Image: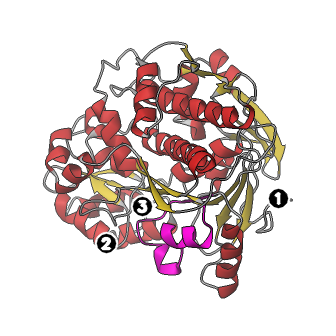
Amino acid sequence: MTKALTHDILRLLGRKKRRDDALAFTNGEDPIFATPWRVGHAGSAALGAVGLALSDLWRLKTGRPQSVTVDRHAAAASLRSNTYVLRDGKKPISWDPLAGHYPTRDGRTMFLHTNHPHHREGALRIAGATEATREALAAAVLKWGGQAIEDAIAAGGCVGGMTRTREEWNDHPHGQAVAKLPLLDIVKIGDAPPEPLPPGPQPLSGIRVFDLTRVLAGPTSGRVLAENGADVLHVAAPHLPYQTEVLLDTGHGKRCAWIDLREQKGVATMTSLLREADVFTQGYRPGTLAARGFSPEQVAALRPGIVCVSICAYGIEGPWADRRGFDSIVQNVTGLAATQGSLASPRNLPVQALDYIAGYLAALGAMISLARRAEEGGSWLVRVSLVQVAHWLASLGTIDGSNGMADLPEAELATLLMESEGLFGRLRHLKPVVQLGETPSRYDRPAEPLGTSPALWAA
């Protein structure tokens, strides 16, 4: 069943099943965790597709495919990998205490995301809270109707969403627009001659990735590419909010640099780096970077043959395409949280499946595009969103999740973890999940703080 779903994903991207595909899934079926959603099945299938794409790249380099093995328990755990991080033996704090569900005047529930300071301040201001406490925010939200505060939060440039049922979301104009979109797509955006893959000991050795993303989905895609040999330069700006603790989960194998696009020097630096990049991944809302001269088409003109990857919350079609969002918000507006609990008492899933699977699919799209570039040339654009992943996960149907685990047993979890030493101290974190027969995935560098490395490609 999981193998068939893997090939369905690849078929969507034009990759047909091959007789020499050696793909195996091990260790159980859903429910792995206590959720009615088939998160183990979905995560394993996405990672299986990643593994076969890596095998294809290795075949292009050497003429040999590789075997691919995915442990379903490890795949499910990877959808909550940030929860397993320890820094010098301590768990980092990743959620603001004000984030969460709030009842409204009309019996609905509003989920507010307050992990970034400006979103936190905006939620308090817009709701009309008298002080920055959960009790004051709850009292303020209770004065609003659900639809009214959802609209106000969005209009104020902040992040939140009213919990809906699956039926309500399917009837919503944006739900209907997203239902017409594929899980992800790849489109050709320019002409360029074929480029063979660089030589090296891993499938992505010699591939340069400009990673302009934040939070989880985008950085996860860069981590997948880094663990298979890519030179990933993770770029941020000092003035923009960033949950630094996320780097403890997604920063392995990367270098981190500062670039400030408010300054001409920063624009020039980014332009220079993109001229030598193979992959440009960005996680901003549609049109945001185009205003600064870095739309996919502009980047393809700058560097013919580049693969652009775009990750956003709500997709490229529909009335919410420009709306800000995160995994937790999308779970609530699309009905996943109401199904996990109920409409009256919604609960988020025990995993951040939308973020991590979107990251895996973004990496998959980049690798499929690199294979196309090697064989036929061209510049390519990969598009995926959290809400498209939510629709896909929902399309897999539900099961009785009551027998699922709260977490993997400690003895099993220990076999999936590793430690690394670096500027963050001693980190415990998950190992790469996809196991390749010839080129084991690995992290060549420990995670490092933002701005540690110069904005240069590795020599």
Number of numbered discs present?
Answer: 3
Packing grade of label 3 (10 A; few <14, some 14-19, many >=20) is: few
Do the residues bearing badges 2 and 3 touch, measured as CB atoms within 8 Å?
no
C-alpha gap between disc 3 and disc 1: 46 Å
| Residue in the picture at 80% in, 63% down | 453
194 vs 202, left or right, is left
Colour scheme used in the picture? Answer: secondary structure
Callout 2, which amino acid?
A: Ile
Residue farthest to the bottom?
A: 264
Please, is residue 196 above or below residue 303 in the view?
above
| Residue in the picture at 60% in, 83% down | 262
Label 2 element class: helix
| Residue in the picture at 44% in, 38% down | 14
Packing grade of label 2 (10 A; few <14, some 14-19, many >=20) is: some
Please, is residue 312 above or below residue 270 in the view?
above
Quarter placement of the N terminus? top left
First in sequence: mark 3 vs mark 1 = 3
Question: Within the magenta stretch, is there residue 52?
Answer: no
C-alpha gap between disc 2 and disc 3: 14 Å
**Does residue 295 show up?**
no
- The answer to which quarter of the image holds residue 91 is top right
Q: Position of residue 411 (x, y in %)?
A: 66, 15
Mark number displayed over residue 445 = none
First in sequence: mark 2 vs mark 3 = 2
- Tell me which segment is drawn in magenta: 279-305
Residue under circle 2? 126
Please, is residue 23 above or below residue 314 in the view?
above
Do the residues bearing badges 3 and 1 touch, measured as CB atoms within 8 Å?
no
Mark number displayed over residue 133 = 3
- The answer to which quarter of the image holds residue 308 is bottom right
Callout 3, which amino acid?
A: Thr
Mark number displayed over residue 458 = 1
